[in-house]
Amino acid sequence: EPEVTQTPSHQVTQMGQEVILRCVPISNHLYFYWYRQILGQKVEFLVSFYNNEISEKSEIFDDQFSVERPDGSNFTLKIRSTKLEDSAMYFCASSEVPGQGRPEAFFGQGTRLTVV
Amino acid sequence: DAKTTQPPSMDCAEGRAANLPCNHSTISGNEYVYWYRQIHSQGPQYIIHGLKNNETNEMASLIITEDRKSSTLILPHATLRDTAVYYCIVSLSGSARQLTFGSGTQLTVLP
């Protein structure tokens, strides 16, 4: 079965540094998402991306975050100046275009980001 | 999106059916019921979804009450690998709506 892949599986970074989390969505999917889960807390939506632009974003997705689809296969989340509270598991997901195909989102296995 | 209410935890014996309830009394007519699960901090995994009819796939069955105010996810023969947090989510299908995960139900399958 096709799957969403994320790299790296674990990233440790110093506070204030920039990090880029990478994702390869399922090849025929056109909608992409980032979610995060702080340890012991709920899975939270960050952003959705379609047709090379942000479709929706949550209040968490502030100016320090950005997303990009730099080529035909990768989808990235950049955190410009990491803070301790950015430590979390970050999940990438993809789906077919809602209303035009299967609606369910497929999630990757996540990148555990630790800010020290 | 409508709010959902699930019990925080449930146990089930291996090989028996696991019945996970969900209340969504404020669901609107065009909102679907989705079920996902998360096995030990892995990425959430889609299980099944439905609008008003009962649904079945290779993983589970979904029973939605006639008034659509509640639903039950049924795992017909639970295995130890089904131990996970199960999330019931109400969401529009066909729109760019994000999934709103609650606290879910921690299902523990006992040997």
Image: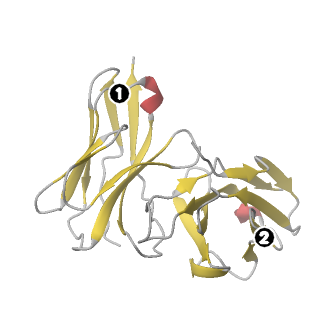
Looking at the picture, which amino acid does disc 2 mark?
A: Ile
Q: Colour scheme used in the picture?
A: secondary structure
Q: Point out residue A79 in the picture as x, y percentages from the top left corner.
A: 78, 70
Q: Point out residue A33 in the picture as x, y percentages from the top left corner.
A: 60, 66
Residue depicted at 31% across the width and 27% down the height: B12
Q: Point out residue B39 in the picture as x, y percentages from the top left corner.
A: 52, 39
As drawn, is A54 to the left or to the right of A76?
left
Looking at the picture, which amino acid does disc 1 mark?
A: Ala
| Quarter that holds the C terminus of chain A | bottom right
Query: Disc 2 on helix, strand or loop?
Result: strand
Q: Point out residue A25 in the picture as x, y percentages from the top left corner.
A: 66, 58
Question: Callout 1: 10 Å neighbours few (<14), some, many (20+)?
Answer: many
Label 2 resides on the chain identified as A
As drawn, is B29 to the left or to the right of A78?
left
| Quarter that holds the N terminus of chain A | top right
For disc 1, the marked residue is B78
Instruction: Kindly identify which numbered label has been placed on residue A59.
Output: none
**Would residue A54 be visible to someone looking at this image?**
yes
Task: Identify the image quadrant of residue B61.
Answer: top left
Question: Callout 2: 10 Å neighbours few (<14), some, many (20+)?
Answer: many
In this picture, is B30 found above or below A4? Answer: below
Residue depicted at 44% across the width and 32% down the height: B83
Residue depicted at 26% across the width and 52% down the height: B22
Query: Disc 1 on helix, strand or loop?
Result: loop
**Would residue A41 be visible to someone looking at this image?**
no
For disc 2, the marked residue is A79
Q: Whole-Å distance between the Cαs marked 1 and 2?
A: 40 Å
Mark 1 vs mark 2: tell me if same chain.
Answer: no
